[in-house]
Image (spheres, rainbow, N blue to C red):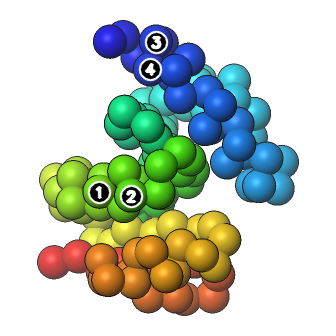
C-alpha cells in the first residue's frame, strides 16, 4: 500500500490523537512531515503511531508523537520502534500522552518522567 493510502487509512486515528495534543499540529502538518522525512508513520492493521527523531545537544531520542487505534497493536510496535531507534543512533524512546500509557508501557521498560514516559535503550 502506498504511503498516501496508509496515511488516508490511518487518518481517523491520527486526528483522534491530535485532538488530545493541544492543537500543535493538523493532519496536513503530519502528512507534510512524514513526506519530508521529519516524522515516521507506523501503520498496523487496526492502529498507527507517528514518531519523530529528536536531536538534543547531548543525545538523540525517538519520540512517539501520536498513537491511535487498538492499544495492543500499538504496544506491539515497541520492538520494531526500539530497533529503528537504535539503527538511527537514538539512546532512548519517549512518549508524551495520557497517564494511561504508563500502565500499558510499564512492562516494556518505560518509566514516568514528568508527564513523559522514557525508555532507555542500549
* Residue named by callout 3: 5
- The residue mark sitting in front, 2 or 4, is 2
Q: Which residue is drawn at 56% across and 17% down?
A: 8
Separation of disc 2 and disc 3 at Cα? Answer: 23 Å
Sequence-earlier tag: 1 or 4: 4
Numbered tag placed on residue 72 in the rendering: 2
Q: Which residue is drawn at 63% across and 79% down?
A: 99
Numbered tag placed on residue 6 in the rendering: 4
- The residue mark sitting in front, 2 or 3, is 2
Above or below 2: residue 122:
below
Separation of disc 4 and disc 3 at Cα? Answer: 4 Å
- Within the image, what quadrant is residue 98 found in? bottom right
Query: Contact, CB < 8 Å: mark 2 with mark 4?
Result: no
Can residue 54 be seen in the rendering of this structure?
Answer: no
Q: Is mark 3 on a helix, strand or loop?
A: helix
Circle 4 Cα neighbour tier, 10 Å, few/some/many (<14 / 14–19 / ≥20): some
Query: Contact, CB < 8 Å: mark 4 with mark 3?
Result: yes
Above or below 53: residue 95:
below
Sequence-earlier tag: 2 or 3: 3
Amino acid at each position: 500500500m502506498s504511503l498516501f493510502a496508509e496515511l488516508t487509512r490511518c487518518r481517523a486515528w491520527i486526528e483522534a490523537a491530535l485532538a488530545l495534543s493541544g492543537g500543535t499540529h493538523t493532519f496536513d502538518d503530519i502528512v507534510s512531515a512524514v513526506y519530508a522525512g521529519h516524522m515516521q508513520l507506523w501503520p498496523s492493521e487496526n492502529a498507527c503511531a507517528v514518531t519523530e527523531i529528536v536531536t538534543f545537544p547531548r543525545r538523540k531520542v525517538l519520540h512517539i508523537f501520536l498513537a491511535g487505534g487498538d492499544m495492543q497493536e500499538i504496544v506491539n510496535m515497541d520492538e520494531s520502534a526500539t530497533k529503528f531507534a537504535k539503527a538511527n543512533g537514538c539512546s532512548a524512546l519517549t512518549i508524551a500522552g495520557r497517564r494511561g500509557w504508563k500502565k500499558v508501557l510499564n512492562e516494556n521498560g518505560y518509566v514516568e518522567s514528568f508527564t513523559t514516559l522514557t525508555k532507555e535503550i542500549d
